[in-house]
Amino acid sequence: MIAQASNLVHTVDQTFYFIVGVSVFFLVLITGCMIYFVIRYSRKRNPKATNIHGNIPLEITWTVIPTILALIMFWFGWTDYKLESTPPADAYNIDVTGQMWHWTFKYPNGVEMDSLFLPLDKDIKVNIRSKDVNHSFFVPAFRVKKDAIPGRTNTAWFRTEKEGVYNLFCAEYCGMKHSYMITKVVVIPVNDFNALLNRKLNEMNSAASKDTTK
Ligand SMILES: [Cu+2]
């Protein structure tokens, strides 16, 4: 079972299991019918074939039911899409940059890190860019996946709901060391998160002042 760590988990999983459920049901039904007919109407049991010219009620049934099922799938997909593509106005912004072969996460105070640290119970909006080729920002535990395309900014958002360490992958083959683009998402309480950002900011500033005194 994949970790469930964001507000998107429920709707995405619901859509996924509905589609898988419908698919498995029809796989079993159709395969079962096929096997039954092959045996029941084999030449041995049914030496003289019948020519059937159609059956209106049956045809209506097998058109209407799949249409309704497909529309339900569309509805699930559409509501998920709407939720995922409308980040709350006050979401916390992080700039995500993919490049061969690592990720960089830049925070509003200017700090950059190569793991994605996040505050717990916050709406997070990621602005995803690429410096070179196509990459894809993928965090299974959040049910978030969005391509990083050179020359444009793609956004995604989610609410962190569970403390923990999760995998972050590049999900778009981007060259030899594509698999090296695995890194960690670390969700920590807000206080710890703020302390971490301040510490990183101080480190960055002291490194910069050392540079200028040289
Ligand atoms: Cu990549």
Image: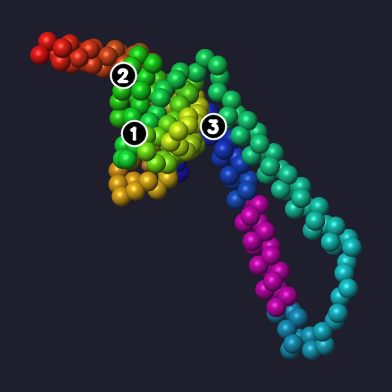
Is residue 191 in the magenta section? no
Up the image or down, 27 lies above or below 112; here it is below
Q: Which residue is mark 2?
A: 111
* Residue 56 figure quarter: bottom right
Q: Which mark is residue 8?
A: 3
Three-letter amino acid code of the residue under disc 2: Val
Range drawn in magenta: 21-38
Q: Which element is circle 1 on?
A: strand
Question: What's the coloring here?
Answer: rainbow
Q: Earlier in the sequence, mark 3 or mark 1?
A: 3
In the rendered picture of this protein, how many numbered marks are placed on residues? 3
Most extreme residue toward the front is 151
Q: Which mark is residue 103?
A: 1
Three-letter amino acid code of the residue under disc 1: Trp
Give the Cα separation between the discs numbered 3 and 1: 23 Å
Proximity of marks 2 and 1: CB atoms separated by less than 8 Å: no
* Residue 80 figure quarter: top right
